[in-house]
Image: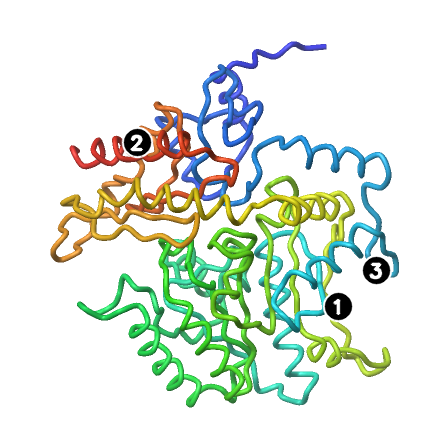
Amino acid sequence: MTTHDRSNRALAQRDLRHLWHPCTQMHDHERIPMVPIVRGEGAWLIDADGRRYLDGISSWWTNLFGHANPRIAAALADQARQLEHVIFAGFTHEPAIALAEELVRITPPGLDRVFLADNGSAAIEVALKMSFHYWLNQGHGEKTRFIALTGSYHGETLGALSVSDVALYRKTYAPLLLTPILAPSPDTYEGEPGETPQQLAARRLLELRALLEQHAHETCAVIVEPLVQCAGGMRMYHPDYLAGLRALCDEFDVHFIADEIAVGFGRTGTLFACEQADVSPDFLCLSKGLTAGFMALSAVLTTERVYEAFYAEYSAGKAFLHSHSYTGNPLACRVALETLAIFREEPVLERNRALAAHLAGRLAPLRDHPHVADVRQTGLIAAVELVADKATRRPFPAGERRGLEVYLHGLKHGALLRPLGNIVYFMPPYVTTTDELDHLVDTAVAGVERALRR
């Protein structure tokens, strides 16, 4: 048996011979280190050379209760000894049944049906197709379009990308995509001087109303990321917009799709972001924190009314035939159940609010920084917007890649920070301590100063 060198350098060399990484220009790795991680421990990642990195972004916003969490790991191992997978057409199993029951119990009222899929993008595909197919089954085949917010991001598969508005992701594939109707985002960063978040939300709702007056007849649904548009730059807005959106969707007879893939499961301060507006969407898309970062799984919750539009004799041709090989995977469902049990049995949201308050206090001094245009926060999501000119909010040229300097500084000082362009954000695991948050903020601030000295 061949014994491989398992140092950082050796593993990185092996990786770069064959692997192609996501969201990466691989040429960058001629100068940017590839970091081989061999284990995780709480909020920390440990590389092959023993260096430790505080995971300030929850490994792409998935990890809630720490890496290698022993309770979740034990549940996964127990399930693996019983049933690893079974076809989910015509067969079922208790982990999926119990997960559906628990999701119906904890989500906003009226979401009584659960469709399982593999990942966040797949959940968006399901919701888009299900919304369109609902209207088709109801005799409204003219409804073929979707309204999305400017700056939105919903995933990388073609349907999900079609309702996204981040040029970095969308531009190349534009000829392959559906064309959404874009409604102006209620992003508070775009507000007029002196305009409150509530006033901006009201103004944007009037603009959405105008779009619906013109396009409701051809619109299946409005899709939004509740409260925080994450990949679009951690843009945040007031819950009033969600309440108004629900009312407009009811008035104009279009669906409301809530993409809570990144913001669900306690990230915004409540279990689900929609709770802060006391609304129930027609479709709720969940993933990421659903399994606390352990397994790929997503869920789309919808109403009995939607379900009934597909319920008919086979000959009617109304069935929703969308499928994934790993739909309802028992391992992933069992992990999700254990994740939700932690929420049920421990004061997770209370701890999160305390951590969020500490983070807010630590970031507050940056509001006066001459190159910081905005410091914004919703729950345990916080962002610092770096600009070339504070008065005009003129951004740094994207080609300067100043955010990359923050990332590289973080690696050298034991922190995983991965800015979105020139927006330095924090989305730590829920098990992070206040001392660890201090380390994260201190490292980020020092990284910002380094990036600004260029």
Mark 1: few/some/many CA within 10 Å (<14, 14-19, 20+)? few
| Residue 397 visible to an observer of this rendering | yes
Choose the circle earlier in sequence order: 2 or 3. 3
Residue 354 is situated, as x and y percent measured from the top left of the image, at 44, 44
**Label 1 to label 3, Cα distance in Å?**
10 Å
Q: Compared with residue 60, is residue 96 higher up or lower down, i.e. above or below?
A: below
The answer to whether the residue labelled 2 contacts the one labelled 1, judged by CB atoms less than 8 Å apart, is no
The answer for how far apart the CA atoms under marks 2 and 1 are is 51 Å
**Which residue lies at the image location 37% right of the left edge and 79% below the top edge?**
205
Closer to the eye: label 1 or 3? 3
Tag shown at residue 321: 1
Q: Residue at x 49, y 18 (%)?
A: 8
The reply to whether residue 157 is in sight is no
Identify the image quadrant of residue 283: bottom right
Q: Amino acid at mark 1?
A: Leu
Q: Quadrant of the N terminus?
A: top right
Of the image marks 2 and 1, the number of the one nearer the N terminus: 1
Quarter-of-image position of residue 392: bottom left
Mark 2 surroundings: few (<14), some (14-19) or many (≥20) residues within 10 A:
some
Q: CA distance from mark 2 to mark 3?
A: 51 Å
* Disc 1, SS: loop
Where does the C terminus fall, quadrant-wise?
top left
Residue beneath label 3, please?
A: 89
Residue visible at 55% across and 70% down? 257
Please state which amino acid type lies under the numbered disc 2.
Asp
Who is closer to the viewer here, 277 or 76?
Answer: 277
The answer to whether the residue labelled 2 contacts the one labelled 3, judged by CB atoms less than 8 Å apart, is no
State the residue position of label 2.
Answer: 442
Q: Amino acid at mark 3?
A: Ala
The residue positioned 53% from the left and 77% from the top of the image is: 221
Mark 2 or 3: the one toward you: 2
